[in-house]
Image (tube, helix red, strand yellow):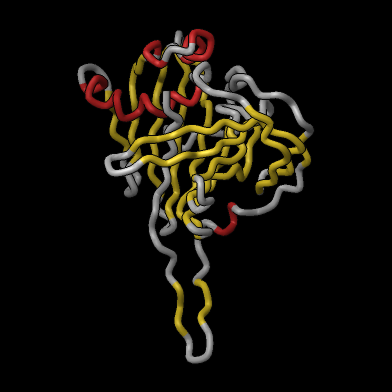
Amino acid sequence: MRYILTVFVTGIIFLAGCSSSDKKPSPLDPYWTNKGNTIAYKKFTTPKKWAAGQFIVVGNLDNGKKESISKTTVVRKEKTGWVYEVITINKKGKTTGAQMCVEGIDLVKSKNDIDKINFVWIKVLDENGAVQVIDGSMINLMKPLYKSQFEQFVVSDYTFEDGGAVTVPAGAFKGTTKIKVEISGLMSKKTYTSFFHPDVPVNGLVKSEDEKGNVVSELLDFGSNGKAVIE
């Protein structure tokens, strides 16, 4: 089982002056606002049960540069599945995303089996604001792409460790649970360390970073009153 991180690695543009260089304001800057929350330690073993309105906002950085943010929202319960949405904003302020109706989330958590996931339909939002609906036979073509998002709920293969206190823009977590995962790419392997807390909805993630601390995903905000972007 692998814990998959999606990080958009691009550059930040700097303005050159005669005597100094000023960093160009990023459309992502407002998301990196310290919320001032303090969260007491609780042991993490599995993500909390989903409920409509739960959301997390995660910021992705590369070498300290803001690359993108992603907002994940549990939209609603629909028959036997959950409607789940991920919206991404990149450093240029372009918004893309996907909303999907997924069956089997509770079984993935309880049985630790990613194959219990079934996609009923998927809506894809492009940067021009157009929405494409994918269903029927097309679902099978898209399933491998979106299935990896739910591997984070399979926790039986992990070794849990004390992660200590972790501070991110969403708050100061006085204690976390740490998991180390090795991910194999085409040319190399990387080790990521992820920190979790059971009060964080959706997947429990507080922070994740590579072995050098260069590629970082950190929690910017979370709550229970999230709204969908894709209609």
Q: Residue 152: give x, y in percent of width and height.
A: 48, 26
Q: Is residue 3 left or right of residue 53?
A: left
Please report the residue visible at 42 percent of the width from the left and 28 percent of the height from the top: 2
Please report the residue visible at 74 percent of the width from the left and 34 percent of the height from the top: 175
Residue 159, image quadrant: top right
Q: Closer to the camera, 22 or 45?
A: 45
Q: Residue 116: give x, y in percent of width and height.
A: 40, 11
Please report the residue visible at 35 percent of the width from the left and 39 percent of the height from the top: 125
Q: Closer to the camera, 217 or 58?
A: 217
Work out whether 122 lies above or below 174: above
Residue lying furthest bottom in this view?
Answer: 18
| Residue 24 in view | yes
Quarter of the image where the C terminus is located: top left
Quarter of the image where the N terminus is located: top left
Residue 96, image quadrant: top left
Q: Residue 144: give x, y in percent of width and height.
A: 29, 25
Work out whether 138 lies above or below 185: above
Q: Closer to the camera, 207 or 85?
A: 207
Q: Residue 222: give x, y in percent of width and height.
A: 63, 37
Please report the residue visible at 45 percent of the width from the left and 54 percent of the height from the top: 67
Give the mark count. Answer: 0
| Residue 224 in view | no
Q: Is residue 92 left or right of residue 170?
A: left
